[in-house]
Image: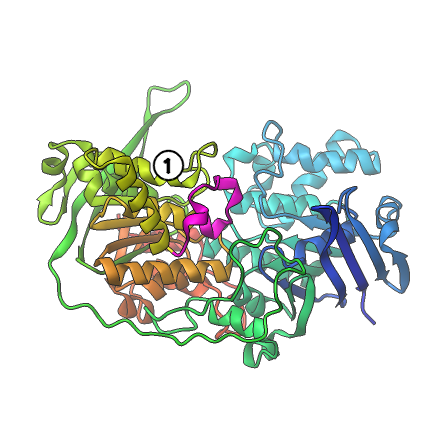
Amino acid sequence: MALLSIRDLDVHYPAAGRLVPAVRGVNLSLGEREILGVVGESGSGKTVSCLSLMGLLGPRAEASGTVHFDGREIDVAAVVHERRQGRLPLAMIFQDATGGLNPIRTVGSQIAEIFVHRDGASQKTAWDKAVELLETVGIREPRERASSYPHQMSGGMNQRVMIAMALAASPRVLIADEPTTALDVTVQAQICKLLRLLVEREGLSIIFVSHDLDLVTSFCDRVAVMYRGAVVECDTSEAIRRAPRHPYTAALFAAIPGHRPPFSQLEEIPQNLDAPLSASPTQPDLQKVDVTPQLASEPAEQPAMIEVSDVAYHFAKRRWFSRSTHITKAVDGISFAVPAGTTFGIIGESGCGKSTLASLLIGDREPQSGGISVGGRSMKELLAHGRRAYARRVQMVAQDHYGSMDRRQTVGPQIEEACRIHFPERSGARRREDALRMLQAVGLGEAHYAKLPHQLSGGQRQRVAIARALIVEPDILICDEPTSALDVSIQAQVLNLLLRLQRELDLTILLISHDIRVVAHMSHAIGVMRAGVMVEQGPAQEVLSNPRHAYSRSLFAAAPTSRRASIPMSLPSTESLLKDAIP
């Protein structure tokens, strides 16, 4: 018998004068010591289904259905009361761990507070229990770390703190909503390992929500696939990996880089880009996916469009109450060359120096040593003719496409602005014409010209960011985590767009990412960064199939893929990796 189950769950929200279904007839079950994966894109209803279990739907939601827990039937409307009475021992952790913690209180005090208010424990007893929980979730030196603030800890450590806070409630079921989405691949694997250990040691059952089908099928015991508010398929991970029955599940797999040959077109899930409400009855049911992959030919040998020679950039920070200065080697003697018309992928975890390197390449910072050349001319020579002359040749697509846009200005003028700066001789009519042409080139239309950023989807905003960069006709496009915040089908659209534009415009692309699948699909050559050093580089297939450095092997082993049976449960420690790092 299942420990927890949901029966005939329906959730509606009022919108545009009518009730729109967010969840339709959902039935799910979770066994003892089981990990159930719930996978789907934004708007599929996976998070709403979990919030209904926690009684967190909000006052505007209209919900019906029943929850069965340990043999007892509970109406979904009574979930909040049952949880307050301790008869429904569930806990939930969310995606943004750092944002979910109080920034002005130590992590230990935030955990201890639960024991004080719930159990009436003394401050000392509560603190000791908090330290014990930090140790349970794998935080080293837990007593010292308990006195740290969230900003003093990494994203992975903060996620462990959130898990510790959830465990303080003594749950039998833990709901994890996108707990690894914002984390690097090795940290993601470590969190998955921790959750599996909690199942084995603490007897937890877990509902693991994600949009990453590769991760879910490699980690969970069973998987439920949600589309348009309904569960369209539910089976064991092995069965779904081997033979997905529903077209949407097959389409999700086909849209993931790594399931198609490098440089081939990823399958895009049909959808209405202008749909005002995702997961609504106005969006047609998916019945088939019909896209023919097209392989790109290998580019002929080309001279280097961008060359980096022994570039270094260090940050100096004066320690508090000390005369000593701490030096951070963000970029430490990096060299590589990228032939024209090719893509060089840079892989590495947060803090390895990828974004600092991007700022050097874009000209925001000057190298403290070494040199950068573009098209055979040095950066210093190009910058001597003005910052705009260099920006004409090198443009960047930032990770935070929403934050990089003016939220009060419509899309068209934002694209035209770059044209006005670099081509002041062009008339207003010509700039508008160029902006419309570029919108069409990135798969948007004239209707998007007059829209504000908040009226666009994440994929549409990323297309606008690409259009804004390409309107000045650059030779080099630097893409810093261009798809990290996007659903898999939107990611496929953006990657297909970049491949097409590269062929049409002969673009040279530097692709910075922590997603190995994306880099492997897009890149002709790959460089692996760690602690400011390029520890390994070479042709993409050679580096991926036969990595020489211990860090590269660890990074690739941690990447989720449906071709592996499970997430690796043992990863080299940071200390062991440092032994192999280049000084």
Residue 415 seen from this side: yes
Q: Position of residue 419 (x, y in %)?
A: 27, 39
451 in the magenta segment: yes
Q: Residue furthest bottom?
A: 243
Is 260 or 457 nearer to us in this picture? 457
Q: What residue span does the magenta drawing correspond to?
A: 443-460
Q: Is 111 placed left or right of 507 in the picture?
A: right
Query: Residue 75: x and y, percent?
Result: 88, 56
**Colouring mode (rainbow / by chain / secondary structure / one colour):** rainbow
Crowd rating for badge 1 (residues with CA inside 10 Å; few <14, some 14–19, many 20+)? some
Left or right of 357, for residue 93: right
- At 36% from the left and 58% from the top, the residue drawn is 551
Q: Quadrant of residue 26?
A: bottom right
For the point 26% across and 64% down, which residue is it? 524
Tell me which amino acid carries mark 1. Answer: Pro
- Image height check: is 396 above or below 282? above
**Residue at the spot of label 1:** 413
Depth order, front residue of 284/87: 284
Quarter of the figure that contains the N terminus:
bottom right
Q: Is residue 254 magenta?
A: no
